[in-house]
Amino acid sequence: MIMVAKAVEPKRVMEFDNLPEGCIANVLSFTTPRDASALSVVSSSFRSAAQSDLVWERFLPSDYLSILSQSQFPHLSSKKDLFFHLCHKPLLVDSGKKSFALDKKYGKKCYMLSARSLSIVWGDSPRYWRWISLPDTRFSEVAELVSVCWLEIRGWINTAMLSEDTMYGAYLVYKPSLMGRSYGFDYQPVEVTVGIAGESDPPKRTVYLDAEKPQGQSMRQIIPRRSRRRYRLMADVEEPAPLPPPPSPEPSVESVPDCKGGSECPKKRDDGWWEIELGEFFNKGCEDREMEMAVYEVKSGDWKGGLVVQGIEIRSKFNPINSIKSN
């Protein structure tokens, strides 16, 4: 007997273009801003769905209305316009002491703490620090370092303000003073830490703040060694004399490793400022913690000055879990 196989009719597969726009928009809302923008060129249906407020409201933080209420904000016609406005134009919040922005790729929350919101040792003494206004900064004031032998800057942020399940980096944002070249940093490293506030021994790194030495150039030179004076900072101890000690006539060799663009070296930002990474931390989101970031050089006793500090920026770093919607 000859068996005749019955032809199997191929299953009909519905193309995405035939799906309702609302359905496509709902699918896109579970991706990322970067993916939604890329998929918008697939077809006219995707392009139309990718403009939907349904999609871009999912990319905005769940508390975005509360954040916007802290500042005067222009009316924008769509949630997509709002998203990209916050990516490119940081919003001043907390009475102008912080700025808020979104990461363009994944929509993660980013903050910058202004210099005024930081704890700067002797920051209120004009002999050591002065407060100035510059046109290329987010804030009304920045801190200019005149001259100190004890450099200590600290800032804090609550992890509840940040996106969950996200790796963050903290960066000191600064540049050389307009009055002239910075000094005391070209051969003297500073210590930086990022950790839970009150932690006894947070992770510590050594970095360099000299933003004017070309990266990759050897930082070896014969320079005079300044006489060392150590000061113990106590709340009830008087401030040291503002003038730096005179240099010793006998030179000595100071040497630090070449600066080849690693995380221990400053990098130029698109806005013209410089930044140095202080450290990183993973924000699980299930814990309400206070993160402390610090920059200090208190061991050498050498005088240093000529920097302008805008603040400390906390922004997301790329890692696979950052692509998960959790802001």
Image (cartoon, grey):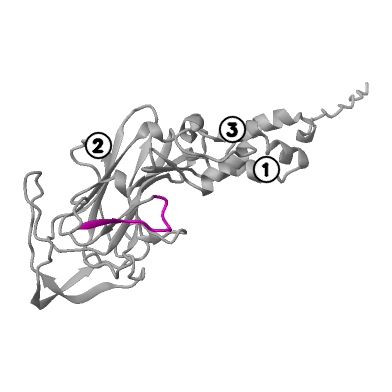
Q: What percent of the width, then of the height, locates residue 183?
A: 23, 68
Query: Residue 298: which quarter of the image?
Result: bottom left
The CA distance from mark 1 to mark 2 is 42 Å
The CA distance from mark 2 to mark 3 is 33 Å
Q: SS class of the residue under badge 3? A: helix
Say which mark, if any, is on residue 88: none
The residue mark sitting in front, 3 or 1, is 3
Q: SS class of the residue under badge 2? A: loop
Q: Earlier in the sequence, mark 3 or mark 1?
A: 1
Residue occupied by mark 1: 39
The CA distance from mark 3 to mark 1 is 17 Å
User: Which three-letter amino acid code belongs to the residue tagged 1?
Assistant: Leu
| Magenta span of residues | 128-139
Q: What percent of the width, then of the height, locates residue 140?
A: 38, 50
**Which residue is at the front of the view, 311 or 34?**
311
Say which mark, if any, is on residue 197: 2
User: Which three-letter amino acid code belongs to the residue tagged 3?
Assistant: Glu
Q: Is residue 104 left or right of residue 48?
A: left
- The residue at the point 33 percent across, 66 percent down is 178
